[in-house]
Image (tube, rainbow, N blue to C red):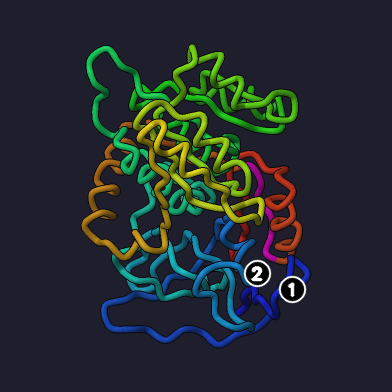
Amino acid sequence: MKALVITRTGGPEALALQDVAEPSPQPGHRIVRVAVGGLNFADIMTTAGGYPGTPAPPFVAGREFAGVEETTGRRVMGYVQWGAFAEKIVPKSELVWPVPEPWTDEQAAAFPVNYFTAYLGYWQAGMTQTAARGRTHRVLIHAVAGGVGTAAVQMGRILGIEMYGTSSSNEKLTRVKSLGLEHGINYKESDYEEVIKELSGGEGVDAVFEMLGGEHTAKSLRCLRDFGRVIQYGTATGKQPQLDVRALYAKSAMVQGLWLTYLAGKRDIMEAAWHQLSTWIEESKLIPVVGHVLSLDRAAEAYRLLMERKNFGKVVLKISG
């Protein structure tokens, strides 16, 4: 079968479309014929050798997919550590979910990583519960026009959260506002820390969804209200997060890590998250935003779209069909 292989540590040039052996069935697992794969920043880090637990090359790339179970014919979407960008895969049964009837394969492949990450971010921030009387939850979402960002905006709208979002493009911010974002901040034109201070009357936000790293972790911490949380779920800048512990003291604040790879192994947490997400899906309140669809032989181009932050919503790869 054909698959996208990471042949060595590096950038998109390390990717190659190759023939590999088909996977063998495992007890309790079903083979899935993959139609579409979803691309994430974690895939960029994996190719560069900077993602925790990455095996030595060569190995098949990809951690998110949509397709059909061979034995049942059921349309499914799911999450794996790697190996999703291949014509067939044998995922763990607990990390496979049915594709909602109206969704395309492309929408399904845009769901697992982005929507579970966004939901668990709100859960860790304590925002899946009603805010205290007289108080509105506020969140700052970095890279708001990306996959997790657009998912977080859709959920924030459902939860009644006041949302602030950063992007490098006014055009992207306008498009995200149509999803429910109230306050868009072009970080190339304004200092988001100062904008947050001004728009919130000096109070700040209750949580920041932070996936940039470097100086942005410290800046995000300064954007918090008292008792707020920075939810750190990535380091897209490639720089280690900076942190001033004294700023934590000053606001009784917290920096909390969110790693889907770890949480995906907690069945009770994932089942509770899916219960809520599937309810919102049935109510037509969540619809994945797909920005770019490319064939598997254009994978390097897809990776560069993400690396250069030129995407809006999800970048997906057509694997077969």
Q: Amino acid at mark 1?
A: Ala
Mark 1 secondary-structure assignment: helix
Mark 2 secondary-structure assignment: helix
Q: In the figure, residue 95 lies in which quadrant?
A: bottom left
Above/below status of 176 relative to 86? above
Q: Residue at x 76, y 57 (%)?
A: 301
Find residue 64 and report its horizontal and vertical position in percent: 49, 60
Q: Residue at x 59, y 26 (%)?
A: 193
Q: Are marks 2 and 1 in contact (CB under 8 Å)?
A: yes
Is residue 301 left or right of 219 when viewed as pictured? right
- Using the image as rendered, state which of residue 182 and residue 239 is in the foreground: 239
- Using the image as rendered, state which of residue 227 and residue 103 is in the foreground: 227
- Using the image as rendered, state which of residue 111 and residue 149 is in the foreground: 149
Find residue 284 and report its horizontal and vertical position in percent: 37, 32
Find residue 160 and report its horizontal and vertical position in percent: 35, 22
Q: Look at the image and tell me whether residue 235 can be seen.
A: yes
The kind of secondary structure the magenta stretch mainly shows is: strand
The residue tagged 1 is 14
Above/below status of 192 relative to 264? above
Residue 292 colored in magenta in the image: yes
Is residue 28 left or right of 310 when viewed as pictured? left
Count of marks placed on residues: 2
Disc on res. 47: 2
Q: Residue at x 62, y 48 (%)?
A: 214
Q: In the figure, residue 26 lies in which quadrant?
A: bottom left
The residue segment tinted magenta is 291-296
Say few, some or many: other residues with alpha carbon within 10 Å of mark 1 (under 14 / 14 to 19 / 20 or more): some
